[in-house]
């Protein structure tokens, strides 16, 4: 399956994808990497890995680039904008969220904001959710969820590290599951 990665930062999830594909643990191939921000580390990493890498300022620019690569699945990897795909990819956008949806999600809930909210609420478990994205933040069909414990003594950074470790397992698992079952099997 031909995949595009959309990111907005350091490219840690791109690192994970690249390593998993190289080891044979993740199916599919990354055809192109796009960033909503110029000059981010994620674009530098993409170029180092040999992927075509572009800054694309909006949905129109992203979609214009994607049409040149025959993309079948779009992977949001720390992409901080609401992405609106072209019609043929409308059901083919995966996202990872750093909590167990439906908790701690929605507009403005990303990254450390989620982990601070988890700590403030005092929950005993959190985790990550890989889901299909639609036009509403964090509401598409869920593919994989992973739980992690939250200890009273945990700092926000401890929670973030534990969740990211779970994400590194869950996202490739979700991609492999989507490739095996087909995108349409997840949608009503």
Image (spheres, rainbow, N blue to C red):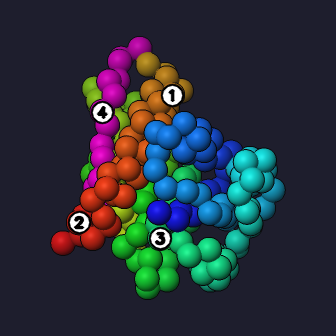
- Name the N-terminal-most of marks 4 and 2: 4
- Start-end of magenta stretch: 136-153
| Mark linked to residue 72 | 3
Q: Which of marks 3 and 4 is nearer the N terminus?
A: 3
- In this rendering, the answer to whether 12 lies above or below 124 is below
**Looking at this view, is 55 or 153 the one in front?**
55
Q: Residue at x 32, y 51 (%)?
A: 177
**Spot occupied by residue 165 in the image (x, y as percentages of width and height):** 47, 30
Task: Name the residue at 65% across, 64% down.
Answer: 32
Confirm or deny contact between disc 2 and disc 3 (CB under 8 A): no
Rendered view: 130 above or below 135: above
What residue is rendered at 27% in x and 59% in y? 181
Dot 2: element = helix
Would you name the residue on which mark 1 appears?
161
Q: In which quarter of the image is residue 147?
A: top left
Q: Residue 185 carries which label?
A: 2
**Eyeballing the image, is 173 above or below 63?**
above
Q: Secondary structure beneath disc 3?
A: loop
The Cα atoms of the two marked residues, 3 and 4, are separated by 29 Å
């Amino acid at each position: 399956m031909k995949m595009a990665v959309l990111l907005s930062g350091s490219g840690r999830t791109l690192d994970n994808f690249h390593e998993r594909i190289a080891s044979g643990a993740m199916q599919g191939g990354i055809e192109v990497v796009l960033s909503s921000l110029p000059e981010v580390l994620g674009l530098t990493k993409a170029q180092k890995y040999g992927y075509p890498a572009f800054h694309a300022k909006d949905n129109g620019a992203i979609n214009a680039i994607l049409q040149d690569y025959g993309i079948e699945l779009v992977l949001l990897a720390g992409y901080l904008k609401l992405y609106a795909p072209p019609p043929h990819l409308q059901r083919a956008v995966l996202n990872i969220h750093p909590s167990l949806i439906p908790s701690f999600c929605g507009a403005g809930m990303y990254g450390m904001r989620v982990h601070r909210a988890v700590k403030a609420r005092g929950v005993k478990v959190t985790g990550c959710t890989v889901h299909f994205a639609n036009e509403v933040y964090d509401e598409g069909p869920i593919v994989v969820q992973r739980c992690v414990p939250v200890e009273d003594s945990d700092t926000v950074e401890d929670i973030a590290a534990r969740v990211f470790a779970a994400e590194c397992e869950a996202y490739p698992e979700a991609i492999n599951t989507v490739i095996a079952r087909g995108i349409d099997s997840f949608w009503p």
